[in-house]
Amino acid sequence: MKLTVIIPCYNEEGTINELVNRVINNKYSNKEIIIVDDCSTDKSREIIAKFENEKDFKIIYHKKNMGKGSCIKSAIEKASGEICIIQDADLEYDPKEHLKVINPILQNKADVVYGSRFKGGEVSRSVYFWNRMGNFVLTTLCNIFINANLTDMETCFKAIKTDKLKKIEIKEKRFGFEPEITIKLSKLGCKFYEVGISYYGREYHEGKKITWIDGIMAIKCIFKYSLFK
């Protein structure tokens, strides 16, 4: 099955080049790479432009900053692989683990696989207690509504069958798309799996972007997409 690697990018000049090269060199060869630059104001766009003529690359440039959810939506429209995996442009998640994450789909066991930072057994940087607690609350709340036992709904490593993903209209422009697609995929009757992954978390001075405000918005999204069509 062909894999589409979706890379949303906003102001990641320090990591985007290395990240893309890691994706190129991972163990899964049948893939395309879609990079969406969300109107970066640093040198990210110049770095991304170097890949424009590379084989199996698609580059999308947003004319204004629209948010991660908007980047994913733009990429899905161009995706040609049977599986999509979301890969952030930082180095918190390791592209070497793509095969590990998509394997339940390749085995025809799953429609959706989330790479969980909390399943255990893998290396994980210890940062931000309150972020972890916020994630726990959001994941638990989402589980209540979709009757699931996910451990990491907010993970950025999400692998999804493309035909399922294309049935969803993503409305959320920022990080609210995480609970949105989880709930909407559940309503489609998708089979969810989780696998443990490594996590090399960043601190805010290193470029981490999600804040407590995004957590509040995620709670609103959980109620919005669970209780209303």
Image: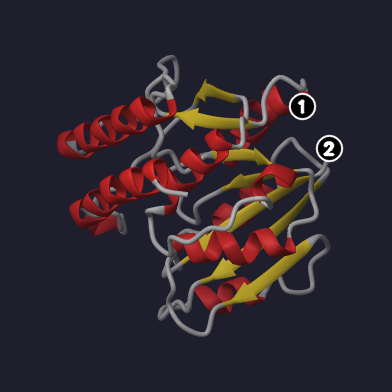
Within-10-Å neighbours for mark 2: few <14, some 14–19, many 20+: few
Real-space CA distance between mark 2 and mark 1, rounded to the nearest whole angstrom: 7 Å
Within-10-Å neighbours for mark 1: few <14, some 14–19, many 20+: some
Apparent side of residue 196 relative to residue 140 in the rendered image (left or right): right
The amino acid beneath tag 2 is Met
| 79 in relation to 39, above or below | above
Read off the residue under disc 1. 106
| 110 in relation to 49, above or below | above
Q: Residue at x 42, y 67 (%)?
A: 67
The amino acid beneath tag 1 is Leu
Point out the tag, 2 or 1, that comes first from the N-terminus.
2
Read off the residue under disc 2. 1
- Badge 2 marks a residue whose secondary structure is loop
Apparent side of residue 189 relative to residue 229 in the rendered image (left or right): right
Residue farthest along the left direction in this orientation = 130
Estimate the x, y position of residue 98 in percent, counting from the top left: 64, 36
| 86 in relation to 196, above or below | below
Foreground pick, 94 / 74: 74
Question: Looking at the figure, which quarter contains the N terminus?
Answer: top right
| 5 in relation to 68, above or below | above
Residue farthest along the top direction in this orientation = 121
- Answer yes or no: do the residues labelled 2 and 1 have beta carbons within 8 Å? yes
Q: Residue at x 56, y 39 (%)?
A: 185
Q: Quadrant of residue 47?
A: bottom right
Q: Name the colouring of the figure.
A: secondary structure
Q: Quadrant of residue 122?
A: top left
Q: Residue at x 47, y 79 (%)?
A: 39
